Image (spheres, grey):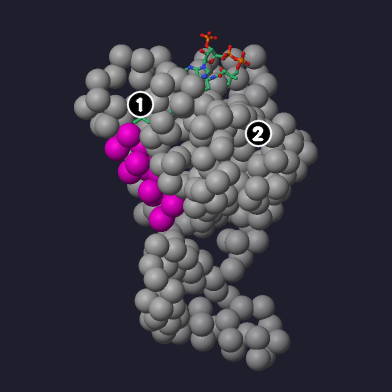
Amino acid sequence: MNNLTLAVENEIAVLTITRPAALNALNSETLDELNEVLTEIEARDDIKVVILTGGADKKGNEFKSFVAGADISEMVNFTAAQARAFGMRASVPFFKLMNMRQVTIAAVNGFALGGGCEISMACDIRIASDNASFGQPETGLGIIPGFGGTQRLARLVGMGRAKELIFTCDTIDAQEAYRIGLVNKVVPKEELMSTAKEMAAKIASKASYAIAVAKAAINNGYDMDIKNAVEMEANLFGITCSTHDKTEGMSAFLERRKPDLTDF
Ligand code: CO8
């Protein structure tokens, strides 16, 4: 992979987007590599949580940029058909981040603009360093957010705030992103990766299969009416009741011991 690195330790994968010359902007090659590596991760039983972050800029500053958007130099001459193809190229790995059985955490270490904000929103959880900033500057470039931003931003922060951010192109700091619910947590930049890894370890220590099922229930139920969504939840609950982890988890509670949770 030219634009991504993958490091796996203790069931946690750290996936780093590394395009130092372009502040980790997403081009076609990076999106294809992302799709490839997420496909590999999905098939791996030894990875329970994926932390997505941005690599250092060309001066070695690790907290300059998470992802500064889609690559403008690639998009500048796009025809409508090429733009659509580019959007779909992102859509596939972004839906993987959203729906894969592993939990995905964006550790946002600087600029999360345009496609950068959008890829963070495709993750399950966002943790921001205190210097991070977020925005959807597309309408200032004559385009609209095209990697799911008009949809995921409205779902995360509500329609009014999403419209304000998209129509004004304002960049907001990490605290404001936290205040409006765009990020789960803001931490001093030196603590970003340790905080993300701590949360990942906590998640990895729970029943991984149950978490994957809970993730599917939340994602799928979100766009359903409440009655059908709760019925779907009941059905999925039934499935988790047929697992080793359910028997082990409940027995361990009653026997006052630590459970040995193994399903995934
Ligand atoms: N694309 C390509 N190159 C970029 C990008 C980008 N998005 N962002 C930064 N770079 C490059 C710069 O061109 C520069 O290259 P060079 O050193 O060769 O001149 C290098 O990265 C460093 O950037 P700057 O010198 O500009 O660094 P600053 O610290 O001065 O500024 C900023 C940092 C504020 C992040 C600035 O670089 C910036 O504004 N970048 C663009 C941000 C942006 O507008 N992002 C949104 C892009 S559009 C988008 O994401 C659409 C997504 C949906 C597409 C859907 C298609 C279907």
Main secondary structure of the magenta stretch: helix
Residue occupying image coordinates x 65% and y 33%? 172
| Residue 161 shown left or right of residue 190 in the figure | left
Percent x, y of residue 71:
43, 21
In the rendered view of the protein, which quadrant contains the C terminus?
bottom left
The residue tagged 1 is 29
Q: Is residue 252 left or right of residue 22?
A: right
Mark 2 or mark 1, which is nearer the start of the sequence? 1
14 or 111, which lies in front? 111
Residue 193 in sight from this viewpoint = no
User: Residue drawn at (35%, 41%), measured in percent from left and top?
Assistant: 91
Q: Quadrant of the N terminus?
A: top left
Cβ of mark 1 under 8 Å from ligand 1: the answer is no
Query: Considering the numbered disc 2 on the image, is that residue within a helix, a strand or a loop?
Result: strand
| Location of residue 106 by image quarter | top right
Residue type at the position of mark 1: Glu
Callout 1: 10 Å neighbours few (<14), some, many (20+)?
few
Amino acid residing under circle 2: Ile
At 65% from the left and 24% from the top, the residue drawn is 64
Q: Residue at x 53, y 42 (%)?
A: 162
| Region rendered in magenta | 87-100
The residue beneath circle 2 is 172
Within the magenta stretch, is there residue 116? no
**Residue 93 higher or lower than 155, as above or below:** above
Q: Position of residue 83 (x, y in %)?
A: 29, 27
| Residue 170 lies in quadrant | top right
Q: Is residue 21 visible?
A: yes
- Single out the residue that lies furthest toward the bottom: 254
Residue 91 within the magenta-colored segment of the rendering? yes
Instruction: Give the label on residue 240, or none.
Output: none
- What is the number of callouts on the image? 2
* Label 2 residue near ligand 1, CB within 8 Å: no
